[in-house]
């Protein structure tokens, strides 16, 4: 059984992305007890799936490493991975929470030596790379994964392969008898930081995502550019593995649209501007990026970044929401529409199309197992009616990392105030 | 200038957007357009040769107060009601209906281009249908074919002969409709009264002289 120490002076943080980690660290560094619950087998959330961060173009692992160092140095944070909150009852200052733990089939003895991986033969979809590749059924989710522990896929448990995997481990770390368990814990305040998910591009039917292989999403493009990704960092298009030198970006794919997401997702203009730099880095003057946009929203300090990209002769901008995509015989996606600067029709072929899909909350407010107020898109709102529950990061709005971290710090402060009152007997 | 045109010019002065919002069907949606261009890009009619202005440009022109250019344009008459733009518009602007609203309003003002074929079809269809309460297809086609004179009409009719014969065989076209007034609705008077009432209500709602 997993044991968790928690009282009504504990802060529960749900979601271990950059926002949840920040909230947990900020609260723990003021002396509070924190339990951090993460659904994935590793911490870091969606940011570790990015190749580089705007605006400084640094690698996300760098920021993550600093946070992990703070986390390891802090005895007041207990981390539960492969864990999901299934029930919350009670009120501000005294919540009771049930958490479901999925079996990892690997215990703390794991040294990440990788022998189990060699013994495995079954391949499963590589969720970390948005299923662009495959991994073996005994795997480390990503190179930087924290905790550095392998995971065994349930599909091989109870098979001869499972036994072979177990036999390969010299440290008695493989435990195929692990079962799903549910633990109940106490908390005085809860930080809800479950983040975002990319909007389902297949719903934007004229763009034929899922049907045309060379129409991909911006999150997938991050994986293509990353040296740790499925192509080893080469920008190759999915249909035939050809280098994608002529890349189109379609902005507002699903955002600012009454038929899809009503809100502007805010980060996606910057994400596409950033991704033109990946094309530039890979192919130099032989690469070409075209951004099809309604208007570019490079908010406040990001204006410089936009100007730098504009100055690049290999990047062009077409003011137009693309009407539809067709596919040429050679697999080139062809974009149809009207350039609203001059009302000029175009039917342009490209090697690869990247849909700048927007963000929606990964857990909408109505799906949280206790009443929490949300806006029309399901993002958690800040409201006294939420009692001791505070939204943080992309669970509250479409935000970039900088703003997500600010929001997480604010949430941590709210939660700290609640448990401090409990400690003083005021709540 | 027609009376109605004079009346509206005086009422709205230079506020053409307001005029469209209040007088053209669905015109109050024009302000919701965010100029994304998806309607223009989705339109199957080739507006470069047939249209002066795609829908999105028309909406911008309305907001810019280009009254004569918009009302005298043939563009909205070229809409074939395919609804591509309508279903894709991210603002859910009922573009197709606005196209027809603009066309109808321009016609009422006497500003619509006179030789526009769609306009001729619409007018012929309306007169034909409201006369007896039923569309008389034989008369409708006759009027359309012979609009450019006898010779052209005969030529067109000859070209369509096999189609017409097929329709007759399938009992889709009754040549006897050409004789007399064709078949009618039972209560033509009632239909005419209804149309008159609708017109009166519209005039009231839009503050026009009936
Ligand atoms: C293509 C793309 C490029 C981007 N590039 C940049 C950039 O260059 N610079 C920048 O500043 N921002 C960028 N962003 C934005 C950035 O990804 C977000 O700001 C950031 O991920 C927000 O972090 P978060 O912790 O709020 O959410 P997330 O990263 O989504 O983390 C949420 C965590 O909660 C977990 N979780 C979800 N549901 C549950 C549950 N029920 N129970 C427990 N845990 C759960 C998830 O597994 C995840 O680990 C980009 C976004 C995209 C899509
Ligand atoms: S489970 Fe065992 S074999 Fe696999 S990485 Fe961990 S220690 Fe190595
Ligand atoms: S940030 Fe840009 S691409 Fe994203 S929804 Fe807003 S305008 Fe569209
Ligand atoms: S699709 Fe809608 S919002 Fe876009 S230009 Fe046309 S009317 Fe305006
Ligand atoms: S409904 Fe009319 S305006 Fe709209 S796309 Fe079709 S033809 Fe063009």
Image (cartoon, rainbow, N blue to C red):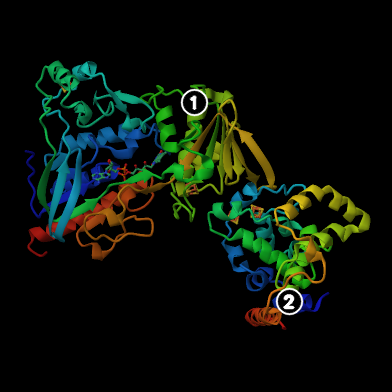
Image depth: mark 1 or mark 2 in front: 1
Left or right of A134 on screen, residue B93: right
The answer to whether marks 1 and 2 mark residues whose Cβ atoms lie closer than 8 Å is no
Label 2 lies in ligand 4 vicinity (Cβ under 8 Å): no
**Distance of label 1 from label 2 (alpha carbons):** 59 Å
Taking the image as shown, residue A163 lies to the left or right of residue B192, namely left
Q: Position of residue A300 (x, y in %)?
A: 46, 49
Residue A202 occupies which quadrant of the picture? top left
- Count neighbours of disc 2 (C-alpha within 10 A) and say few if under 14, some if 14 to 19, many if 20 or more: some
Number of numbered labels in the structure image? 2
Instruction: Left or right? Give the position of A408 relative to B200.
Output: left
Which residue does the numbered mark 1 point to in the structure image?
Answer: A239
Residue A123 coordinates in the image, percent (x, y): 29, 23
Q: What's the residue at 79%, 64% (across, down)?
A: B176
Whether residue A343 sits left or right of residue A94 in the image: it is right
Quarter of the figure with residue A75: top left
In the rendered view, tell whether residue A341 sits above or below residue A316. Answer: below
State the quadrant of the N terminus of chain A: top left
**Residue appearing at x 26%, y 50% in the figure:** A409
For label 2, the residue is: B8
Q: Which mark is residue A339?
A: none
Q: What residue is drawn where x is 55% and y is 51%?
A: B88
Chain letter of disc 2? Answer: B
| Above or below B33: residue A283 | above
Q: Nearer the viewer, residue B78 or B21?
A: B78
Tell me the quadrant of the picture where the C terminus of chain A can be found: bottom left
**Helix, strand or loop at disc 1?**
loop
Callout 1: chain? A
- Confirm whether residue A172 shows in the render: yes
Q: Position of residue A180 (x, y in %)?
A: 14, 38
Dot 2: element: helix
On screen, B198 above or below A333?
below
């Amino acid at each position: 059984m997993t044991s968790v120490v928690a009282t009504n002076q504990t802060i529960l943080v749900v979601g271990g992305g950059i926002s949840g980690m920040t909230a947990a660290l900020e609260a723990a560094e003021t002396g509070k007890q924190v339990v951090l619950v993460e659904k994935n087998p590793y911490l870091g959330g969606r940011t570790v799936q990015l190749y580089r961060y705007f605006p400084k173009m640094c690698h996300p692992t760098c920021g993550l490493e600093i946070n992990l160092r703070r986390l390891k140095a802090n005895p007041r944070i207990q981390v539960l991975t492969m864990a999901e909150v299934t029930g919350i009852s009670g009120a501000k200052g005294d919540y009771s929470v049930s958490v479901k733990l999925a079996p990892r089939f690997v215990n703390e003895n794991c040294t990440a030596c990788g022998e189990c991986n060699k013994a495995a033969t079954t391949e499963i979809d590589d969720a970390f790379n948005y299923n662009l590749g495959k991994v073996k059924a005994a795997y480390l989710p990503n190179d930087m994964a924290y905790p550095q522990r392998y995971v065994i896929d349930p599909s091989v448990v109870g098979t001869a392969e499972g036994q072979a995997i177990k036999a390969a481990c010299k440290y008695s770390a493989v435990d195929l008898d692990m079962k799903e368990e549910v633990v109940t814990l106490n908390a005085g305040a809860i930080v809800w930081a479950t983040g975002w998910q990319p909007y389902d591009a297949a719903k934007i039917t004229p763009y034929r995502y899922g049907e045309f292989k060379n129409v991909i999403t911006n999150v997938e493009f991050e994986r293509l550019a990353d040296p740790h990704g499925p192509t080893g960092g080469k920008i190759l298009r999915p249909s035939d593995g050809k280098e994608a030198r002529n890349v189109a970006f379609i902005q507002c794919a699903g955002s600012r649209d009454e038929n899809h997401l009503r809100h502007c997702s805010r980060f996606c203009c910057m994400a596409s501007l950033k991704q033109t730099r990946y094309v530039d880095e890979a192919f130099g003057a032989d690469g070409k990026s075209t951004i099809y946009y309604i208007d570019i929203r490079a908010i406040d300090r990001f204006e410089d970044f936009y100007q730098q990209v504009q100055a690049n002769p290999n990047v062009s901008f077409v003011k137009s929401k693309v009407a539809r995509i067709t596919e040429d015989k050679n697999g080139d996606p062809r974009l149809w529409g009207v350039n609203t600067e001059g009302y000029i029709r175009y039917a342009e072929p490209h090697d690869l199309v990247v849909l700048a899909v927007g963000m929606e909350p990964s857990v909408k407010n109505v799906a949280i197992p206790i009443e929490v107020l949300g806006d029309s898109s399901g993002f958690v709102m800040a409201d006294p009616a939420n009692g001791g529950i505070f939204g943080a990061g992309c669970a509250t709005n479409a935000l970039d990392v900088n703003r997500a971290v600010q929001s997480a710090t604010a949430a941590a402060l709210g939660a700290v105030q609640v448990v401090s009152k409990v400690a003083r007997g005021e709540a | 200038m027609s009376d109605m045109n004079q009346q509206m010019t005086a009422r709205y002065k230079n506020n053409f957007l307001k005029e469209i919002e209040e007088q053209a069907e669905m015109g109050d949606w024009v302000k919701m357009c965010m100029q994304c261009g998806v309607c223009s890009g989705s339109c199957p009619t080739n507006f470069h040769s047939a249209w002066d202005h795609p829908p999105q440009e028309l909406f911008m022109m309305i907001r810019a107060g280009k009254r004569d250019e918009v009302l005298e344009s043939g563009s909205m008459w070229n809409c074939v009601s395919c609804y591509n733009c309508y279903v894709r518009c991210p603002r859910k602007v009922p573009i197709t209906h606005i196209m027809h609203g603009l066309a109808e309003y321009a016609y009422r003002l006497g500003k619509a281009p006179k030789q526009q074929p769609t306009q001729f079809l619409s007018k012929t269809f309306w007169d034909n249908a409201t006369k007896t309460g039923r569309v008389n297809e034989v008369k409708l086609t006759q009027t359309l074919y012979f609009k450019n004179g006898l010779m052209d009409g005969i030529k067109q009719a000859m070209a369509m002969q096999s189609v017409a014969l097929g329709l007759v065989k399938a009992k889709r076209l009754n040549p006897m409709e050409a004789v007399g007034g064709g078949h009618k609705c039972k209560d033509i008077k009632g239909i005419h009264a209804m149309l008159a009432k609708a017109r009166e209500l519209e005039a009231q709602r839009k503050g026009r002289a009936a």
